[in-house]
Amino acid sequence: MMKTKNSRIFGKVLMALTIVFFYLPIVFMVIFSFNSSKSLTVFTGFSMRWYEAMLKNHSMMESLYVTLIIAVAATVISTFIGTITSIGLVYSKKWVKRFVQQVNDLPMMNPEIVTAIGLMLLFITFRVERGFTTLLLAHIAFCIPYVILSIMPKLRSLDPNLADAAMDLGATPWQSLTKVIVPQIMPGIVSGALIAFTMSFDDFIISYFTTGQGVKNLSIMVYTMSKRVNPSINAISTLVVLFITLGLFAANIISILRKKAQDKVVALDGQFRAPKRKGPKIVAALLVAVLAIGLFSYKKASDDNKPFAGQTLHVYNWGEYVGENFISGFEEQTGAKVVMDNFESNEQMYIKVANNESYDILVPSDYMIQRLIQEDLLQPLDRSRISASLDLLDSNVLDLPYDPGNQYSVPYFWGSVGIVYDKSKVDIKDLEKEGFNIFLDPKYKGDLYLYDSERDSFMMALKALGYSMNTEDPDEIQAAYNWLLQCVQTMNPEIVTDEIIDNMAQGRKALGLVYSGDATYVISENPNMGYFVPEQGSNLWSDAMVIPKNAQNVDLAYEFINYTCQYEAAYDNSSYVGYTASNMEAQDELAEGEFAGIESYVPRSDNPNDEVFTYNENTRKTIADLWSRVKIAASNAAK
């Protein structure tokens, strides 16, 4: 008896801990959606600012509309197809039934990434332009198997002669289907529809590979915003939780009311029958209403009085690289619509451009711009259309080696690569004495981050050894490789990407290699952090706007470039992202105001050892191969 009682107590405690584990993060998210600051660890006061920012964020709201439209449409279509297919299978030959069921099970057993790549290759093979239509087709395709899986058990439980009996009593085949079979399997249909809606609403991997033209659902939008903590994500996630909670509440109320209605039998014409079920009709009406509202919202009306009304600008940019009001401000000024796709690396961007995907504006980095120029993938800029904008920019980012005279590019952001460090753990004297060699100092073993970028990691090693980061000397590159091997084998560093931003803001390591803009964000969140660029030199990088050769809307592209260079747009971008504005007035104001005292915001421009990356295909391949070996060595050392 005592053992049974203890088991029950243990079971209840385990259940309570499980509930806390699942729901505490949601409660945490909801609370911090009302935080007055960007912090995710300190609640500084109640505010609705992130809900206001969410509603003003055109891309975020459009992603929510797309998510709802796709989820509802995919649910309705896949439920209809799945229901008809399931009923047809019941009356099919055994070999047909077995074959179709095995084909149906395959997508559910396959890893999602396999399905995603398969669908992407299918669309590419048949030259179907990826966008809203391909996204919807992909969602319908992966939802149908789950609908069939939910309905088939209900069909197996029915008497196989039920349809024949109904027709013997005078029912037509259609009446037999709709009045007899479908009502009997309705629980399975509803279950399949709910699973389909959940799968579609939640999907990321398949959506990511099958969409294009700037069409994003909510999961893709959150992914592109994950580089920096954006509390607007908390706000829109809280909104989704609220809708789901209200939906569950409404479903339970409808279920209770339906049960009560079924308990009351109505006598009519001497026959007894239950009242008609209105639940499915109500649900269908709600789905249609949601779809209609979403479609109405998704088709944003243009202002015919604006100079570019009704036109669309396709931009390919880094994720989280624009201010909160930047896109909406441009759209309001021009009347055009901006479709912005995001890339994670210059190489990812290059693949799409080299494969002739059309964009009106690209925002690559210096060395990649040089490569695009060499391969004749960019069109020269008409200086008469941008000269006034160039006059507004910092001279330090003009006329750089990758594009002399700015014949092809207009600077967007610029910065340096340096060391972000915890002032309470790292002595500034160590940094000044050792520079990048501090990454080999045993004092900081296991307490540092390396950035997962072959260019910048090799830049650090080459500068630590006193070499140029643009060296083509095989011996110097080999020496840098040995330096990095020594680092990963003896210092136990953690190799990371953008997670370094939040991790350093929370002081999880003593130091790490980081971009200056990310350091600006870290220091603004945690004043105990500092930024140091060794005298050995650094990568003085620049990202700039260019117009590809196959751009479809060149006039609007020039409008975008000029708009971006203006003070208001540059200030909005830089204050939000943290990277240094190219517009001189915005840069000065932020350096003296919001980012005052943060040494990473304005890069130095007086160190002769600082360089700009240049493109060399042979060196790039060599360094990429060696960096892969470094990461393998780091993985082995960690074991």
Image (tube, rainbow, N blue to C red):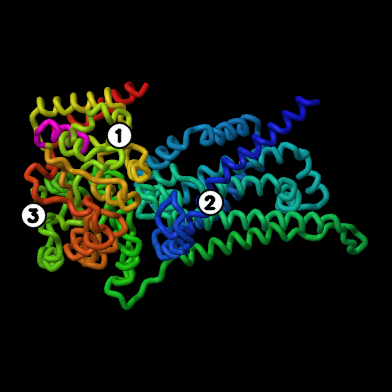
Task: Check residue 74 in the rendering and tell me which mark sits there, or answer none.
Answer: 2
Relative depth, front residue between 183 and 485 = 485
The magenta stretch spans which residues?
455-468
For label 1, count other residues whose C-alpha is less than 10 Å away and answer few (under 14), some (14-19) or many (20+).
Answer: many
Task: Check residue 399 in the rendering and tell me which mark sits there, or answer none.
Answer: 3
In primary-sequence order, the first of circles 2 and 3 is 2
Task: Check residue 398 in the rendering and tell me which mark sits there, or answer none.
Answer: none
Dividing the picture into quadrants, the one containing residue 97 is top right
* 416 to the left or right of 237: left
Task: Determine if residue 254 is in view.
Answer: yes
Residue type, mark 2 in image: Ala
Image coordinates for residue 521, horizontal then vertical, percent: 31, 51
- Residue depicted at 56% across the width and 45% down the height: 24
Give the main secondary structure of the magenta stretch: helix
Q: Quadrant of the N terminus?
A: top right
Please tell me whether mark 1 sits on a helix, a strand or a loop.
Answer: strand
| Mark-to-mark CA distance, 3 and 1 | 36 Å
| Mark-to-mark CA distance, 2 and 1 | 46 Å
Residue type, mark 3 in image: Asp
Residue carrying label 1:
448
The stretch drawn in magenta includes residue 463:
yes
In primary-sequence order, the first of circles 3 and 1 is 3
Residue type, mark 1 in image: Leu
Image coordinates for residue 563, horizontal then vertical, percent: 23, 66
* 232 to the left or right of 632: right
Image coordinates for residue 161, horizontal then vertical, percent: 78, 40
Dividing the picture into quadrants, the one containing residue 188 is top right
